[in-house]
Amino acid sequence: MGLTRPEAKMATWSPDTPCSCDCFVSVSPASAIPSVIFAKNSDRPRDEVQEVVFVPAGAHSPGSRLQCTYIEVEQVSKTHAVILSRPSWLWGAEMGANEHGVCIGNEAVWTKEPVREGEALLGMDLLRLALERSSTAQEAVHVISGLLERYGQGGSCREDPTPFCYHNTFLLADRTEAWVLETAGKLWAAQRIQAGARNISNQLSIGTDISAEHPELRSHALAQGWWDGQGTFDFAQVFSLTQQPVRMEAAKARFRAGCELLQQQQGSITAEVMMDILRNKESGICMDSGGFRTTASMVSILPLDPKKPCVHFLTATPDPSRSVFKPFIFGVGAAQVPQVLSPTFGAQDPVRILPRFQTQVDRRHTLYCGHQAALGLMESGQERGQQLRQKQRDLEQEGLEAVRGLLASKQTSVLQELGSLFQAFVERESQAYA
């Protein structure tokens, strides 16, 4: 499998360490409509390109293998259709959804359990595998925990010759509920969210309210001297680092700010509210600091009524405060949109040549290039930039109004034919930047 297990080693911290993301979910009665609302900002190295990839459902031969970012795993007989927002150099994804209305976002986390060197499954690989293999959020928790047990997590999480590794936390949602899954190596704890709002921000957040856990979680903590075996077991308290790096302290501030923003909107949370939260720069949730920034964003509406479609808004561009959330719906006509697909380099890709990442390639897709030029104009304060920002707002508002109409409609046959909706909005945004 190419999985090695040398001496345990903690990740190296630096001022430019790309370790910030924020995920949010709202479950009734926090949502303003009978839906679960999911949202995530993906904060990554500043120049990293994130593409939006559609992968149709598939059937696979018995015994077939699947190449992930670094290692191969056994393929399953059937995989679900997925829409993914991913750093274009890797196989997995930072966030995404499948045709059954399951959404997942992941985040970096460091705990007392050492981050080991050697290549295994990235947290982003685990996310995609779970989307392809699960029809509910709870099933996705089981898929990830099973893959962790078998293959482990590890490998560099950025396109750079200096390895950067971490463990992962996940926010998983479907039409009826959400789960938080937090890991430390192969160990994990999970919390079920059946009401209210919840967020995660690069730190362990599950305390004593544990809905499921690795069978050796407590015995391992006891053996390591992290827990005395007495009293209530608090996962975050037991497994969190005693001395938090500066960036982790910043994550605490973002977590608190996210909690407050959700609390202020309790009972009235909509897709628009989530978009506003993702655009909040004052809290740091909309990241733009030093070597990293928010490189892509996603908001999903998951209606309780199974007859209504789930709608996933994706930017495919950096900085949600100056990007367009464009609606995607699984249905007839759903296909890969070429304007948000990065170039591929096959066997010559720096991620495939050992040692990895010794050279760089241009991974910018068409929409990214147009958006970068528009971003420069918007930041300059020129009239052309102001006009482009207004076009962005108008296009996004048009998409939101179209979705409101679709979700209110009872004509399910019409809803199923909206697979090309995302492509139409991407094309219009591209034209605005031309």
Image (cartoon, grey):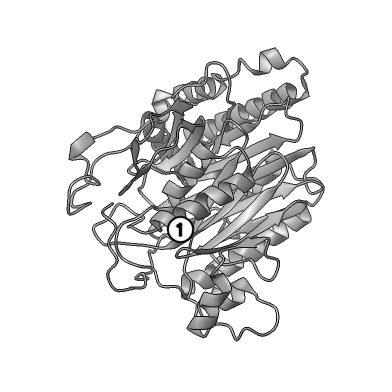
**Left or right, 305 with reference to 1:** right
> What residue is at 58 percent from the left and 25 percent from the top?
330
> What residue is at 23 percent from the left and 58 percent from the top?
161
Percent coordinates x, y for residue 93 in the rendering: 44, 44
Residue 401 occupies quadrant: top right
For label 1, the crowd category at 10 Å Cα-Cα, with few meaning under 14, some 14 to 19 and many 20 or more, is: few
Q: Is residue 184 above or below residue 347?
A: below
Residue underneath mark 1 = 149
Residue 155 versus residue 188: which sits nearer the camera?
188
Which quadrant would the C terminus be assigned to in this image?
A: top left
> What residue is at 45 percent from the left and 21 percent from the top?
431
**Helix, strand or loop status at disc 1:** helix
Percent coordinates x, y for residue 392 in the rendering: 56, 32
Percent coordinates x, y for residue 345 in the rendering: 23, 35
What residue type is disc 1 on?
Answer: Glu
Residue 279 versus residue 263: which sits nearer the camera?
263
Residue 227 versus residue 215: which sits nearer the camera?
215
Can residue 201 be seen?
yes
Residue 198 occupies quadrant: bottom right
Q: Is residue 205 above or below residue 137?
A: below
Can residue 393 be seen?
no
Residue 331 versus residue 373: which sits nearer the camera?
331
Q: Is residue 163 above or below residue 132?
A: below
> What residue is at 55 percent from the left and 70 percent from the top?
217
Q: Is residue 329 above or below residue 4?
A: above
